Structure formats: structure tokens, C-alpha cells
Image: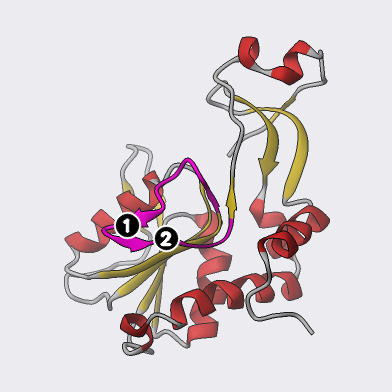
Amino acid sequence: MVSLIPSPDTVMQMLKRTGAFREGHFVYPTGKHSPNYFQMPLAFRYYDTARVLAVALSRKFRVERDISSQLPKIAIISPSSGGIPVAFGVRDALSAEQIYWAEREANGKRMFRQYVNQGEVNPCIIVDDIIRSGHAIEETAALVKELGAKVIGCGAIVRFTSAPSEFEGAPIKSLVEFDAHMYDDGEACGDCKKDSPIEHVRF
């Protein structure tokens, strides 16, 4: 029987099995090099895996009294399209009333795709598939506050340890805290020194 909150090792095994976590020699669009790459949507191709991950993350929120006392009158919000499967899974597990997702426009500003008016958004939990820097969470939180809503929780399946661990004093929930090894360029990259084959990836 699968635990409602599987261990970080178990989650990483699931991500490896689905191809969502890869090891090799990767170069990001920023030019940074890394021996690891996450492509989280690959894990959410499979219903059973998506369900386990979403329920596990939802349990991290449900144990918080400030959140559980407000259910079901809360909103689940994703900062981007990549987090939409997580948001729908967490919404389903918590029976939350609302769900929204934002996307970055051509001008670089993050906006909701839905027509949302001031005062319509319930107290919200912001969830994503992965938190690398925390910028998406911060931008989405600012967008939510502009609409007069309160952020009562934040979380993701994976959080890089280089990203913030708290948001406005509250811990950011995650199933895995990953110590990502990122190198600014090829000169600092150990895999480059070994002449390991390069794979260019995008976020």
C-alpha cells in the first residue's frame, strides 16, 4: 500500500521511472550546466503517478489548521501551465472550490488566463510542479494580492534548495528538496572537463 505522503526517495524513484528526472550533461537556455534535469510533465502523463503526487502534496496542506479550517472555500492557483496538472490534482484532493492558473504574457507580465475580478478569488494555495528560483511563486502571489486575495500556502512537488524555503514566514511545502548542482559555464562544469556529450534542454 502506498503511503499518503511517500518519502522523498520514493518520489525520486517515481520521477526517474517516468523520465521526469534525468541524469547526464545538460545545458539550460541560461547557459548554465547541470548533471540533472527535471521535466516534470512526464510524471503527470500517468494517472496513478499524478494522483499519488498530488494527494501527497495536498496532505502537506491539510495538516495545517489555518488551511483545513477554511476548506472547501479556498482556491488552488498555478503560476504557469506546467503546474496545472498539480493544481487540478491538489484541488481534487482538497475539494477546493476554485482553481486558476497564470501564464507569462509576451510583455513578460504574469496574468491569469481567466477573467478574474477584484474580490472573486478565495484565500489561495499556490502550487507548481517544481520551484527552481521562487520567482514564479512571488509573481503569482503579487498578482493574487492585487485581486484582494490572501495567500495561505505555497508548495511544489520538487523544490530546489537554492530557492526560498519560506513565503512570508510560512514554510513552502514540497515532497522533495533537491540540491541542484548548477555551473555558470563550461569552464566550471566537471562534465565538460570529461568531454561528456551535451544535451541542450529548456525549462
Does residue 21 lie above or below 174 as drawn? above
Q: On residue 172, which mark appears?
A: 2
Q: Amino acid at mark 1?
A: Phe
| Residue 104 can be seen in this image | no
108 displayed left or right of 46: left
Residue displayed at 45% across by 76% down: 61
Residue displayed at 41% across by 53% down: 165
Q: Where is residue 142 drawn, in percent x and y?
A: 24, 54
Q: Where is residue 192 drawn, in percent x and y?
A: 74, 15
Q: Amino acid at mark 2?
A: Ile
Residue displayed at 60% across by 28% down: 28
Q: Where is residue 19 drawn, in percent x and y?
A: 78, 51
Quadrant (top left, top right, bottom left, bottom right) of the C terminus: top right
Of the pair 120 and 64, the residue shown nearer to us: 64
In magenta, the rendered stretch is 159-176
Q: Where is residue 80 drawn, in percent x and y?
A: 46, 54
Q: Quadrant of residue 181?
A: top right
Residue displayed at 36% across by 69% down: 153
